[in-house]
Amino acid sequence: MKQSKNLLAGKRDTLISFGIVIVAFIVVQIMIMTGNISSSLKGQLVPICAYIVMAVSLNLTVGILGELSLGHAGFMSVGAFAGIVATTSLAETIPAAPLRLAIAMVIGAVCAAIAGVIVGVPVLRLKGDYLAIVTLAFGEIIKNIVGVLYIGRDSSGLHFSLIEQKFELAEGGKMIINGPMGVSGVTKISSFTAGFVLILITLFIILNLVHSRTGRAIMSVRDNKIAAESIGISVTRYKLLAFVISAAFAGMAGTLYAMNFSTVTAAKFDFNTSILILVFVVLGGLGNIWGSIIAAALLTVLPELLRAVNDYRMLIYAILLIVMMIFNNSGVKERLMEKRAARRAAKQVSKEGL
Amino acid sequence: MAMLEVTKLGISFGGLRAVDELSMKIEKGGLVGLIGPNGAGKTTAFNMLTGVYRPTDGGIRLDGQNLVGKKPHEICKMGVARTFQNIRLFPKLTVLDNVKVGLHNQVGYSLIESMLHLGSYRKKEQEMDRRALEILKVFDLDREAGNLAANLPYGKQRKLEIARALATDPKLLLLDEPAAGMNPNETGELMDTIRLVREKYGVTILLIEHDMKLVQGICEYLYVLNFGKLLAEGTPKEVLNDPAVIKAYLGD
């Protein structure tokens, strides 16, 4: 049998997403080489990459699974600080920065995934608003825990304590996380290329997941839980799975983000950051992966680009938000989507000679 | 031994006894109707059979295996599939994908294969497509495969729900008012489809229905519920001429 249109349709969305990212990367690289990029924008390249990964991963929870999470920055925070501890500890063992960053990201992802399981198991039994409130609380709890976390490293290994520094470091030891002061003196090893690669990996895995048996199960839970159960889908399993995968990618984004700054504090990953990411997802369109990418990039760059018309900056920003909202909720987009679906169906029928 | 054995099944919601001492026996390959006035407890009985509600007392056995206390998705894996009175499709998935979700436990591959599209992904997806289209063809829905389920007309949504249930390869299919909202033509067509499904897939069918033409036309045996209790049982002819049943439907 010919490849079904489902595989093809999935491929098309995948191609659009990858196309946007690759073209954007090449354009930015050319701009950097020809020196056509402002230094402030250049400084935002890595955060943009991190925000894109955050938005795409949150879209898995909010758009694909259909559960509202207001604590996504919490997972980013876990990944950021786990990554910092990992890179600092591995500095001598693995001198190659890209490899160290990659390993730190994996460690960040694993820690964030563990946090995802701990939060997800009790929380995913809740519905709608309750889930949102508990994830919001989770984000705040993580922020406050990391805010009183002391981690130091000396010749005898890592030392941990909460609330106050209860350990003494041996000669030559170094504090990694210093409570409310956060982390300072991080060796910046993130780069735009690393961010680009992370986006590609995220897209590859999440888009593949969506166009698979697992993704369909997750979307069936979103569309109708009772029906999904009635045809043999374990709702708890797939909710948790989507939530944890989403957390893991947020963890990687956190590591990438943290490794771009010499100073990082827990306060950076607060409720406002969670909401910012959610805004990217909602404006890009729930369940629309490439929408998330564009929204994250555009809304991060926009305040910078509009500096020229400084007086009207927030006005234009707000108008753009409103226009995107209207477009997303109006019939225009739906009619476009329907037309596209109808065209595809017609093609399929003519192909199979039905 | 009967395929489905329901013994003295009962459930209370607070002080309300929704179903009381319901006993049924359905043989393999049977096409049985569960009828009764509105609010008699028919859908509640379905919800207990599929694990949505846990019965307060009584037992349910499918081929000798106990179903009480099992989760809905476990009961589905044991071979019970259903449709709903108020249609419950996956509106944002295509018609094809609705059926493919039904095949979830029939054609499997691992999470890693899902994420990387490696290994048997392609082969298994093609097999799913083939099987899903095959089922859709039976319901004359294959032309709609690429459309969103939400955009189907009502009658086709009803059919798609049955197609999705069949994809789980059930031994027992529970249909909750399959003809609700259909005109006489559509009902006639539905009766043919139900017969065809039984022959082609060898499933045992238990259906709730108010349309007496459908009930008389295809059911071999009927159970009548009234106020949660079994009022009568027997062949359609016996039951529908039973004065107690007529009284329950029409009043005094």
Image (cartoon, helix red, strand yellow):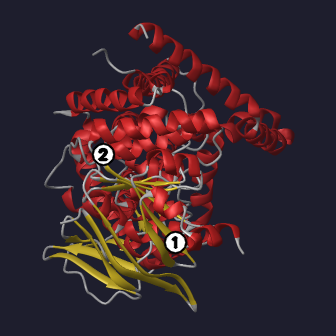
Question: Residue at horizontal 34%, vertical 36%?
Answer: A208
Q: Is residue A336 left or right of residue B127?
A: right
Q: Is residue B227 left or right of residue A349?
A: right
Identify the mark at residue A22; answer none if there is no mark: none
Question: Residue at horizontal 68%, vertical 39%?
Answer: A304
Gap in angstroms between the C-alphas marked 2 and 1: 34 Å
Nearer-the-camera pick, A30 or A51: A51
Asked if residue A260 can be seen in this view, the reply is no
What amino acid is labelled 2 in the image? Answer: His
Instruction: Provide residue A287's location: percent of width, then percent of height.
Output: 53, 42
Instruction: Provide residue A24's location: percent of width, then percent of height.
Output: 50, 24
Q: Secondary structure at mark 1?
A: strand
Instruction: Give the mark nearest the N terminus, 2 or 1.
Output: 2
Q: Are marks 2 and 1 in contact (CB under 8 Å)?
A: no
Residue placed under numbered mark 1 in the picture: B225
Which chain does tag 2 point to?
Answer: B
Question: Residue at horizontal 53%, vertical 53%?
Answer: A62
Residue placed under numbered mark 2 in the picture: B104
